[in-house]
Image (tube, helix red, strand yellow):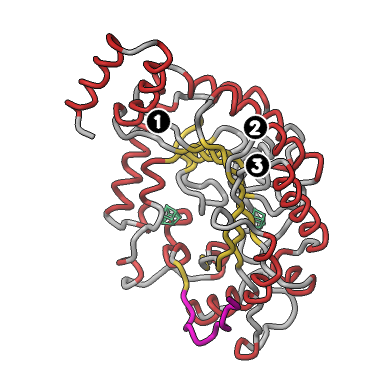
Amino acid sequence: MNWKTIHTLSRVRRYCLPHSLNKELGRALRPYKKIPGLTNINFSFTNLCAADCIYCPSQRGGGTARFMSRLSLETILKECRSRAFQKFHNIQIVSAGENGDIFLHKECLDFLRMIRRFLPGTKVQAYTNFRMFSPPLIDAVLGEGLLDFIGCNIDGADQESYFKVKRTDLGVVTSHLFYFLKKRRRLWKNIPLHIQVLTYHDYVKSVHNCLGVFPEKLQGQPPDTAVLKDDFPLIRAQFLPYLDHPKDKILRSAVIAWAERDQLKYPDEAACALDCPQLDRIEKEAFIAPDGTWYACCWDGKNELALGNVLKESFNEIYFGTKRRRLIESLKRREFALVGGPCAKIQCCQELKIPKASFSACPK
Ligand code: SF4
Ligand code: SF4
């Protein structure tokens, strides 16, 4: 839509339409009026997690705070509602559960209610492993409509293969997951569930084939990668009958080796020709740690790329600040060694691929 159309529609709605229609049209036009600013905020309410995935760095979180406080969230959300913020940014998605499991936070429900209250009209989503997303929390989330989307990973078909990837109990996870699906159907709620699958086979084989090492968090003797079994088809067959189509999905997950940075050397010149795959997100999204640090990227587990702290400076100060601008320019110029931190091992930010022949066929 061009500016002239937006301007004409705005004038028409102001002078000619009844109040209720006027409000509706105003809301529909809002996204087109804004200059491109932030569209997403990703909150890490805690950087702790009940799982310990083989593909996730153990030392997540750089600040001292493990849990975000209610006061911090309230301060941040109040700013997001302010005129100065709204002038430049148009938040469409709030993600709760970045870099940790939201449901480990004892105030998680109150936090979701606060997001709904302060930012009505935004889509609220959460990624969880379902370990701590217990029936009372599921009842509240579904009953009050606190989330619009849920994502999770099921990385093994049985307890043994699941434990090898996630080091947590598959029985508890599946009982919570099936409770969620049953309750969602009973309440007629339209919250999509996306299940991603990153199996032991995919991860170990990709890391070994593409990077020439075994995963750092691998327990026991390194396996023979030639005989590893791919259990994606089994997992898919287990869950597919219980999912609603087309809103739910079960998909193979991309393999990213951000947990292997510590055991890899700095890349050679050929690797420096790689691109930062998160550049788009860095330009449009804010990642907020429990202590208010705005870190640049979701694969910066230790929050080394800190751009500022939203509890000490305003969002606009950080967004328009030199630090953020310089980081984006350096990433565009592929100066990864200069940026340092997680970017210095750029090879760990690329999707690793293994030959198609290694995968078993999926059941229809
Ligand atoms: S990938 Fe997610 S579920 Fe796994 S340990 Fe990391 S935060 Fe937890
Ligand atoms: S290069 Fe840096 S900013 Fe880009 S995805 Fe990797 S860690 Fe994130």
User: Residue at image x 36%, y 72%?
Assistant: 268
**The residue at label 2 has a CB less than 8 Å from ligand 1:** no
Q: Label 1, secondary structure: give it.
A: loop
Q: Nearer the viewer, mark 2 or mark 3?
A: 3
Q: Label 3, secondary structure: give it.
A: loop
User: Residue at image x 54%, y 85%?
Assistant: 358
Look at mark 3 in the image and give the residue it sits on: 189
Q: Label 2, secondary structure: give it.
A: helix
User: Which residue range is magenta in the image?
Assistant: 353-364
Q: Position of residue 288 (x, y in %)?
A: 54, 37
Q: Residues within 10 Å of mark 2 (few under 14, many from 20)?
A: many
Residue 285: quarter of image: top left
Cβ atoms at labels 1 and 2 below 8 Å apart: no
Look at mark 2 in the image and give the residue it sits on: 112
Which mark is first along the chain, 3 or 1?
1
Residue 60, magenta (yes or no): no
Where on the image, by quarter, is ligand 1? bottom right
Residue 140: quarter of image: top right
User: Residue at image x 49%, y 42%?
Assistant: 295
Q: Position of residue 318 (x, y in %)?
A: 41, 31
User: Where the C terminus falls, by quadrant?
Assistant: bottom right
Look at mark 1 in the image and give the residue it sits on: 90
User: Where the N terminus falls, by quadrant?
Assistant: top left
Residue 274: quarter of image: bottom left
What is the CA distance from the residue labelled 1 to the residue labelled 2?
A: 19 Å
**The residue at label 1 has a CB less than 8 Å from ligand 2:** no
Which mark is first along the chain, 2 or 1?
1
Q: Residues within 10 Å of mark 3 (few under 14, many from 20)?
A: some
